[in-house]
Image: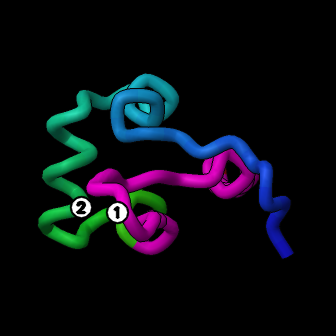
Amino acid sequence: MHNTHEELLTPAELAPILKKSVRTIYNWRAQGTHPLVCGMALTIPGTRGVYWRRSDVDNYLRTLQHHN
């Protein structure tokens, strides 16, 4: 279960972590081509934004490191 006070990242905050542009984040989302960007994105009722849990991003990056 996720912590209810967990840090949420916006596309602008996620982009530098993935070393990509914000436009790339939006393109991946529109195309449905990136497992983190598409599969782990959150929408929050009452907002127009898309967010990612920091812990999901960290876990995803850790998984990538183990495969290299």
The residue depicted at 38 percent of the width and 32 percent of the height is 15
Which amino acid, by three-letter code, is at mark 2? Arg
Q: Vertical placement of 8 versus 13: above or below?
A: below
Q: Which mark is residue 29?
A: 2
- Left or right: 48, with 44 as reference point: left
Label 1 vs label 2, nearer the camera: 2
Residue 35: x and y in percent read: 43, 68
Residue 31: within the magenta?
Answer: no
Q: Mark 1 points at which residue?
A: 34
- The residue range painted magenta reads 39-67
Q: Can residue 62 be seen by looking at this rendering? A: no
Q: Which of marks 1 and 2 is nearer the N terminus?
A: 2
How crowded pointer 2 is (Cα within 10 Å; few <14, some 14-19, many 20+) is rated as some
The residue depicted at 20 percent of the width and 41 percent of the height is 24
C-alpha separation, residue under disc 1 versus residue under disc 2 = 7 Å
Locate residue 46: give its quadrant: bottom left
Q: Is mark 1 on a helix, strand or loop?
A: loop
Q: Residue 13 carries which label?
A: none
